[in-house]
Amino acid sequence: MNKIICVLLTICSTLGFTASSYSANVDELMNPQYENKITLANMGQVQGIVFRGGQKDAGVTFTLPIDQFVTQAQLTLDITASDAIKDSEASLQVRVNGEIIGSIPLSLAQELKTSYTLDVPSVLIGSNNILSFGLRTEQDNLCLLDGNQAVQQVKILASSSLEMTAQQLDIAADLSFFPSPFWDVQNMLDNPIQLVFPKHVTQSQISAAGSLASWFGVQATYRGVSFVVSKDELPLNNAIVFGAPGDKVGELVLPKTDVPLLKVVVNPRNPLYKLLLIVAEDGAGMRSAVHRLSQLDFKKQQDSISVLKEAAITASEPYDAPRWISTRNPILLSQLVTNEQNMTSKGIWHNSIDFSFRAAPDLFLWDGETIPLNIDYSFPPDAWIDAESSFLNVVFNGQFLQDLPVNKRGALEQLWNRLGGDTRQEKASLPIEPYMIYGDNQLSLYFNVKPRKDLPCGTALDSNIQSRIQNTSTIDLSHTQHFSLLPNLSFFVGASFPFSRLADYSQTVFWLPAEPSTVQLQTLFNLNARSGSATGAVIYQNQVILGTPKSLDAFNGKDILAITSMVSTKFNRLLLASSPFIEQDNTLHIKEKGMSERLLNWFQGNWSLSGREADRYFSSNESWRGFISFESPWSAKRTVVVALASTDQQLAKLDSDLKNQLINAGIRGDAAVITDDNGVTSFNVSPQFPSGQLAWYKMAIWYANQHSALFALLTLFIATILGVAFYRRLEQKARQRLNKE
Amino acid sequence: MNRLLCILLIIVLAPAISAIVITPMDSDKQFVFAIVSLAILFLLNLSKRRDVSIILIIFSILTSTRYLYFRAEQTLIFDSMVEGILGTGLFLAELYSWVMLILGYIQTAFPLNRKIVPLPKDVELWPTVDVYIPTYNESLDVVRDTVLAAQCIEYPKDKIKIYILDDGKRNEFASFAVQAGVGYISRTDNSHAKAGNLNNALKQTRGELICIFDCDHVATRVFLQATVGAFLQDSNLSLIQTPHHFYSPDPFERNLYGKHDIPNEGELFYGRIQKGNDMWNATFFCGSCAVLRRSALEQIGGVAVETVTEDAHTALKMQRLGWNTAYLPIPLAGGLATERLGLHVIQRNRWARGMVQIFRLDNPLLGKGLNIPQRLCYLSAMLYFLFPLPRIVFLTAPLACLLFNLNIAHSSAALIFSYALPHFVMSLVVSSRLNGRSRYSFWGDIYDMALTFHLALPTIITMLLPKRGKFNVTDKGALLDKSYFDSHIVKPHMVTAVVLILGIGWGIYRALGYSIFVADPMVIALNIGWASYGLFFLFAAIAAGRESRQIRSTVRLDAHIPAVIHYESGVLSKSYTLDISMGGCLVALPSQHFTDNVETIELQLQSGAVAIPVKQVAVTEQGYRLKFSDMSLADRRELVRIVLSRSDAWVKPPRKPDNPLRSLATIASCVVDVMNDVIKEKANMKKNSSAVPERKIGDNI
């Protein structure tokens, strides 16, 4: 009876430390207390938890950093319930890690939000926890269907939260804990990772930190990761320190070493916190050290390691990012299924089967072509299913695609069905329009199984039916090509494109002012982490240039990601010299276009350029941050993306802007300005250029496609040439015909 | 510009041409393409130059090919078998239309305006001519004037011989032939109908050239002088065809558009297509009003007998042997049109079957002797008659969506509309530009629509079993003394119209959201528009089925011929005619007006005076309206010479140029007129129904 349809989660084995590894005799000052608040949304239940129909159990996991010890905890539940529930004398049982901590009578719940607070014994909370809920009634069968079969709901809102007081623990300085305690994959509180540099930061240190940032990005869950950078100053926290042997960072002097060194030491400012030192003389050493670090696999109770051998780092091929769906072959949906679900739905009430995949953002299909989503599915054979009103809902990226029926829908098939023939539909091919594919995609299949109306409620509850997506189901991107118009900032914010075309950034240069500020570095690393999470690859091959490059050849064949703010005037002038943008009096402007250029743009069909509007917008806002992008003046068909802001304070807000769905989606075109008041505003300042892997003759067709007005004139031109030629020929022929001898 | 250069040019431009055809676009871009294309079209169309016409033809072909490629490439994806079958059917119908559009352009791109080749001064050099007038069951009244007119043809008496080829073996025809002084040939059997009749005569006469008139085709007296010269100029010429001009109204003119000045159904073929065929040396024989070379005919074993359209097949066989054909676009003979829609259907049924027979038995694409344009011209003539099935498909296709919610083209409404719009408008405007003086826009739809249901089955059966079928003679010259509705002929049209109206109603109902079926309003709107378009022409075809009362049409000539009036009292008075026809004349009142009845009128012609007994019908301010009584054959012949065989008897000034929108409005007003007439008549009938017993006329079709 008690069918548990809760999210199955494996409990990870706790990391190797014991209670003895923290010392009890640390004084209060050195042993800080934390006030943590985790909401259901933080735990990943952005929609809250909903009990539908006959569903009775649900649960969610939450995790805490391993070096924190909870001393007090309180759970606040915000609940709404529909009327029928109130009359049912049902109650909501709450458990933490299996222990009942309380039961809420739902008769008190309202349609509007009702809040309940429960104390949670702190001993129940570890680093991995399950918070579970159960609906309990006195009746055996909770038949939560009213006469219209509309489902009654109990909803635990996403705003429900767990408030905890925690204490910092002292864990051993042990490399094998890495990435703990510097960062915990399961940390639900978005604590930033602290990165520390010497006073004069070098290109190779930034490059290595960038690689490491992207590695964190790869590891991060949907919550992402962020960084705080300091120079020549140790934070009162766990931190990762980059530097050359003998460099002084705050009160710490980096150890002298001939080979690249990874070492965990106690933070001199507070021994509860640890520092990871990444020390190497040069760029290659830094890169090997970070590479070694990202391989993990450290021996237990080892606090340092010298990286003796230069590791062979495999170079990327274009579009080989591990997280990007293959466009070589059709992909089985079973490979894309999320949360270790299988592709079977049991019973009548269940969750949707979810699939997710990332794709290169520059997938190209000709107008009219679509991506086939081939779904092979089977509804339960049971006769009590209402075949007319049961469907398989297909939702792609939040957009309803189609309801697939149980039986075939054609006129002949329906006739055959009336005659008692088998007309089950078990295959469907849905076309997905190319514009519906994003960088990050969610496919959701939900078997909306409806029992026949005359069926007693219990039968449906008892049944053990299975609806199934077959293993042969595929999505086929194999006839897409990589081709797009650049610059396109939405590609950049969605998938770090075009830099991620080569996922290790071997054709990317990071370009920053000569003495980059901590905020600028922080912004760079945040962007690097986004790249890692978008591609699943570490950007080992990135290059950094600070200030004026020795030679502009450094930019040859490279895409450039620049980070700056308007105060870095000298750098900005250099950066924007041959771009459509220009710096004047610490304000960004758009270069006025000449008549010939404007005519050319118009003639090429670029009618929606909004340079003047952008210029007005830039000059009318004092405090802003954003992105601009343009074709590289130093290398044709290459792109420059600049993250910039009026001040460093503004620049610091970019990371949270990018984590905001609304703002993220609003960044497009080649200039995007974000302000506190107006959110994001995007512009197309310059014409885009085509970039990608189309053969020349396909490029010709593509040009025709893009310039349909010109294309009509071409048609006229061809018709005129042929027409005049044929006319001459016909005239000649007519003369011959009339003068026949 | 020689041929090689043209081919080279096509090869050089092939990449650009294929880009134009295959470049896919979304609906927005395609709309831009469509609108710019149409703007170009309307601008270019302001110029009436002939080379611009050719440019527009190429433009239209490119656009339509682009549409068809889009249909083939993107829209043939179906969810169910039923949709697959219907959708493929629709695509095949569109493929057919595309082929016909291109063949039509090839045929009519550059029509040849052939001039008369004068005969040499030396009459000795003129070839001898046999004039054949084949008849089977037509009345002597019809045949008489044809024979007399043939006798009026100006040609050396020793070089022209006229024969009545009577398959009806009727005595009165034999005696008429003797009286008139022409040859009479009949035979023991009627095998191979008209073709057999002609072949029988061919064996019995000797003329170098054979001139053939159907028994209702009255020739002008210059007929041979206008046509024979071409044979002397081109020793390889086997046939010269002239237009079939009809002086009586065809069913569409009579029933539908009588009071409007609109090119009749045959004018497109004789005005434009045959001229175009002549350009490609592919004029074909139309059975009458033509002169053929005996040696060419004999080389192919006489007139072809394998099919029921012996004429076209004969020309094809001669051309396969390398003979040339020519078309002289001057009307040199006048005849009677088929009078009722029912008869028109029977006649076209024969043509359609015959052409399909040739397509199957002697396909112009295959076999020896023809060049490519010739093959295509003949192919066009034959494929044209396959129109019924595609027509029915186009007419009923929107029902799949409207009634059954089937999706027979995989595309959004906007996308398919953006592709179809330039294809449709361009082919319409370019066709109007090319053929506008011979056929106004949309009338072809009506003509085809009237036939389509009746020709569908015969063409399919003939396609499968080409050897079946026999010749049926088209009745002509019958009179209708009462209007009636030929429901037998338009019944399928009416059923289809009702179904379409239901479909449109159901579609609107669904689009307004009253139905449980989810329907895209744009798709429904597109289909409603499409169905309404078909329905409009269906109404016009139905209107053409209402047979209006017909009075014998006569050819009346406004001619001032000196005349002497003989009164009953014996008094004579000099006057002149105001008009004259084969039935009577209007004579101006003489200065001295007599109250006496007129007994005889004496017409003073150049060839001498002819006195014809008359009955006085009326006296008006203008003069005496006189009806001719029986007259001698010689007198009648003189009358024919004046009235029917004048050299310019059938020459008319050209029609006004076409305007598609005006044409559409005209059709609408014609349909409304017919409906008003029907309503008025119904009201009258109710009043008189007790008095007059109903008589069914027309059951003898």
Image (cartoon, rainbow, N blue to C red):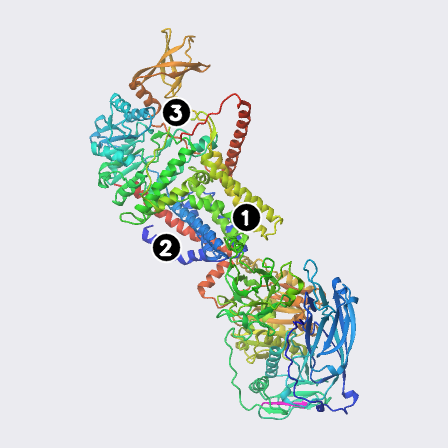
Left-right relation of A663 to A117: left
Q: Is residue B521 left or right of residue B242?
A: right
Image mark 2: chain: B
Q: Position of residue A238 (x, y in %)?
A: 69, 85
Residue A249 image offset from top left, x and y in percent = 68, 88
**In this figure, which residue is indicated by the disc labeled 2?**
B9
* Chain letter of the residue carrying label 3: B
The numbered mark at residue B402 is 1
**Residue A40, located in which quarter of the rendered image?**
bottom right
Residue A428 is at least partly visible in this image: yes
Q: Is residue A468 above or below residue B295?
A: below
State the extent of the magenta-drawn residues as a range.
Answer: A260-265
Q: In front of the other: label 1 or label 2?
A: 1
Q: Secondary structure at mark 3?
A: loop
Main SS type for the magenta part?
Answer: strand
Query: Secondary structure under badge 2?
Result: helix
Where A673 falls versus B573 (above or below)?
below
Label 3 – label 2 distance at C-alpha: 53 Å
Dot placed on the residue nearer the N-terminal end, 3 or 1: 1
